[in-house]
Each structure stands twice: as C-alpha cells, then as structure tokens.
C-alpha cells in the first residue's frame, strides 16, 4: 500500500497554523487515506500499447473459473483471487482476461492484489444476460443493455490496472453473423463516448474476434475504418492455428502478420494455444520476437482453469475443481516457455503513426456495405449526464428482449464526446472535449481540488486578522 504525502504548501500551512495558535478545520488535519497499489496507466500510441514511455506487451492468460456454462465472477471473490494470483506470479504474467464480472459487487480487494502483483485486467463488459444477440442484434442493442455495460465501466475505470475493455467477443463468428458488425461497432462507439463524456481516463476499447478465416481481415478493417469516434482503439482475435511442431510460416502466422503490416492500431491475440495436439507453446518465442512485435502486442493463453467437457479440458493450465489449484502439464510447459522468452525491452519496431483502414466492400463473406451505424438508442443518452447508476449483476433479468432500441442511422462523427453530454438528432453526441481521467467511481464527476491553495488562503486570512488585532 502507498500513502499520498502532503504537498509542501499544505505542510507549511499546517506548521504556520500551529505557530499562530489557531486550529485548522479537523478535515484538514487528518492524514490522507492510503490508496491501493497502482500501476502505470496504459495508453495507445500508434499501433502499440505504452505504460508511460515504455512499450507494453500483453503476456497473460484467459481467466474464467466455471467457464461459460457457470458464469461466475472470479475477481469479486477475494479468496479465489488470492489463490489464483499465486499461480499467476509463478507464470510471471502481466495480464489476465476476465469474460464475465458481477457489476453489483466490489472488486477493490482483488484489483488491489492484482496491481500489487503487477497484473492488469483485460475486461469483457458483456455478460450472458446483457449482450448483443448475434442473430437479432437490432432489438438487443437497447438502452437497458447500454446502461448495464456503462455501469461496468463506472466500476472498473477507477483502477489504474484496468488495461482495456472488450466491447464484444466472437459476436461475428460466421459469414451470416457479419450482419451484426454495425451493432458491435456502435457499442464500441458508445462506450468511448460514455468514457469521454464522464471525463474518465481513456481506457482503450476494442473487439475480440473469432478464429475464423472467412472474414477476420474484413472484421479488423471494419473496426478500424470511418471517423475516429467509431474506430476501435485496438483489435484482438483468437488464434489456435499454431500446433506444434510448427513454425512462423507453416502455422499461417506469417501470413497474418503480413496482412496486418500496415494496420494502424494495436493488435494482439485474445486467445491462443493449440486445441488439436499436445501444447508445447513454442509459439511464445515467435510471438514476442522481432518478426511479430512490429505488428503484434502479445497475447493471452486460453485458458487458466480446466473447464467443462472433454474438449475444453484440453485447454486448462490448472484444475481447481478440488478447491486448490492442481498444476497440469500445460502449466509447467507454459511456465518454461515464458521463462525462456523474456519480454522485449525496446519498442519492438512499432509504428508511431498510421491512418484509418478502408472499410471493406460487401462480398460473399462480408454482408455489410459501407460504414453506416445505428444511432445510439435515445433513452441511453441520459447516462452521459447522470451516470449509469447501479449494475444489475449476474442475477439481473437480462436485456436482449427489452428496452428502447435504435431508431435510425447515426451521422458520421456524431459519437464524439462533449463536455455536456448533449445529444443530436441522430441519437449520438457531437462536439469534442478532453478525455482526461477522473478516477471517481460514482456517477457524479467532481472536479479535483488541491488543499494547498485553500489552506494557504486560510492561513493568510488568520494572519491578517492577527496582525490587525496587534495593531
């Protein structure tokens, strides 16, 4: 734990008040509360992530004990979190991805413990009940859904080790479901606008794509085309194509790097690790090597705990079914692969500048034409000013079939944040404002104040009064 020390003006004023024989208000005399251990906030520069001036490479695991069939929140349970962080530290990872959280619960303890271990959180804001329906995306894109994901943002944006938010996961997993792409992109836009209007720090927002060859490249360029307000801050995709024995070229990784060589935002693997043969994790050395770092920013191994049916069980690094982690063969193999592959210490040849992608043309594998996006549902605009309020948690009634949905097409550029949160006729905000951080977790944004000027003014006032009395 770190404590915030008093500034020089405050310390001097406190000394002066004692010498003058008067007491400052009690609120000024209490030491400032200690804050949880924090990590450098990660931002996007060009096609890479940076923690301050140091490039940040994602090295981590996907973490969801219970799996998709038994949705739980592993970072709301302090004991579970503490248990698993000990395993994360053995792997020496810096990131965990969590697919489902309960936004009605506190995560202070676990986020603090993760920060103390040097670990960031890559967070999916959707839950099984509050998510887009890939078959019927229109009705499911409604104000009830947006309220819940905004509430999740409120809850996690205050932590410096919240690395990024996923606006969706594998919503597009076939040619037919490419029709849902405008709604995924609209959610990304709305999340970015909410963060900006609430004056939060600009936590990156992006999408995690499925491991399919039909339209992976189209999806990537679609999420990065158009006006800045609607473009993703990063693009991630799941890739299980490297199965040992393999290589950079035979695994198709080389082809993918070439396909994204001019991509202008960070790319990383949101899930990786072979699902067909024994995993040796030989791809780790290549992923963090000079052939890939100019384009990729690391990745997340799928997955931490053995879950579900016999197919999924192949992915587990540990078995937690007995309560305590039982390290499986893959754990030791991955631990060795990470140990033999130090993270790069340079910028990896990243591109500091770049331009938006060209939107993909409609085709037999991409069923969307142009970049028209649905306008944000009108009832959702209220959250820009008042905040989202409390989340529904994992026990909520759900959002896919209720709520006011979008009623039109947004004007290009209408998703820029405004200081007032005003909404135009398209249902999306227009204008611009600063997106600098406010770490407030509540729905109200309170301007930061330094105690120094206030205390100094108090001292001057009483000094003047005392001088007048002596005269």
Image (cartoon, grey):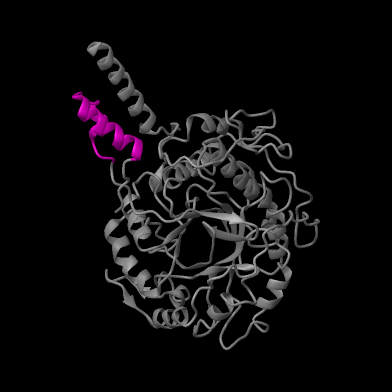
| Dominant secondary structure (helix, strand or loop) of the stretch shown in magenta | helix
Compared to 309, does 27 lie above or below? above
Left or right: 198 as drawn, with respect to 336: right
Where are the magenta residues, as a range? Answer: 7-32
Can residue 417 be seen here?
yes
Q: Quadrant of the N terminus?
A: bottom left
Q: Is residue 226 left or right of residue 455?
A: right
- How far across and how far down the image is residue 358, in percent? 78, 55
Q: Residue at x 58, y 75 (%)?
A: 287
The residue lying at 31 percent from left, 45 percent from top is 5
Dividing the picture into quadrants, the one containing residue 465 is: top left
Q: Residue furthest bottom?
A: 245
Q: Position of residue 427 (x, y in %)?
A: 65, 32
Residue shown at the point (47%, 51%) measured from the top left = 127
Given residues 315 and 51, the one toward you in this image is 51
Image point (46%, 75%), residue name? 315
Looking at this view, name the residue that lies furthest to the front: 471
| Relative side of 34 to 304, left or right | left
């Amino acid at each position: 734990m770190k404590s915030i020390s008093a500034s020089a003006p405050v310390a001097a004023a406190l000394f002066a008040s004692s010498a003058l024989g008067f007491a400052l208000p009690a609120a000024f005399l209490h030491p400032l509360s200690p804050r949880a251990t924090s990590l450098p906030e990660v931002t996007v520069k060009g096609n890479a992530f940076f923690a301050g001036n140091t490039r940040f490479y994602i090295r981590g695991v996907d973490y969801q004990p219970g799996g998709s069939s038994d949705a739980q929140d592993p970072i709301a349970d302090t004991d579970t979190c503490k248990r698993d962080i000990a395993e994360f530290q053995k792997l020496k990872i810096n990131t965990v991805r969590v697919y489902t959280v309960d936004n009605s619960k506190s995560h202070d303890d676990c986020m603090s413990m993760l920060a103390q271990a040097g670990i960031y959180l890559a967070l999916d804001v959707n839950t099984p009940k509050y998510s887009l329906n890939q078959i019927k995306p229109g009705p499911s894109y409604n104000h009830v859904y947006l309220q819940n994901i905004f509430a999740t943002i409120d809850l996690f944006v205050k932590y410096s080790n919240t690395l990024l938010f996923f606006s969706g996961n594998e919503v597009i997993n076939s040619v037919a479901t490419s029709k849902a792409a405008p709604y995924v992109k609209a959610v990304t836009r709305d999340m970015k606008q909410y963060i900006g209007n609430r004056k939060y720090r600009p936590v990156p927002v992006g999408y995690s794509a499925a491991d399919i060859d039909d339209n992976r490249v189209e999806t990537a360029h679609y999420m990065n085309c158009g006006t800045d307000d609607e473009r993703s801050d990063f693009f991630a995709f799941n890739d299980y194509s490297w199965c040992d024995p393999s290589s950079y070229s035979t695994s198709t990784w080389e082809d993918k790097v070439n396909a994204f060589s001019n991509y202008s935002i960070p790319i990383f693997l949101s899930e990786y690790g072979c699902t067909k043969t024994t995993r040796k994790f030989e791809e780790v050395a290549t992923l963090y090597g000079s052939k890939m770092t100019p384009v990729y920013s690391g990745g997340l191994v799928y997955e931490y705990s053995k879950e579900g049916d016999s197919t999924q069980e192949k992915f587990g690094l540990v078995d937690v079914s007995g309560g305590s982690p039982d390290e499986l063969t893959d754990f030791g193999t991955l631990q060795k692969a990470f140990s033999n592959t130090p993270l790069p210490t340079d910028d990896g040849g990243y591109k500091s500048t770049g331009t938006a992608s060209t939107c993909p043309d409609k085709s037999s594998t991409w069923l969307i034409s142009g970049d028209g996006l649905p306008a944000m549902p009108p009832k959702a605009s209220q959250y820009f000013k008042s905040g989202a309020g409390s989340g529904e948690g994992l026990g909520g009634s759900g959002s896919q079939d209720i709520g006011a949905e979008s009623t039109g097409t947004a004007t290009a550029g209408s998703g820029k944040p405004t200081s007032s949160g005003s909404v135009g006729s398209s249902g999306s905000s227009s204008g611009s404002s600063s997106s600098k951080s406010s770490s407030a977790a509540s729905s109200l944004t309170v301007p930061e104040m330094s105690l120094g000027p206030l205390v100094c003014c108090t001292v001057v006032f009483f000094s003047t009064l005392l001088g007048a009395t002596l005269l």
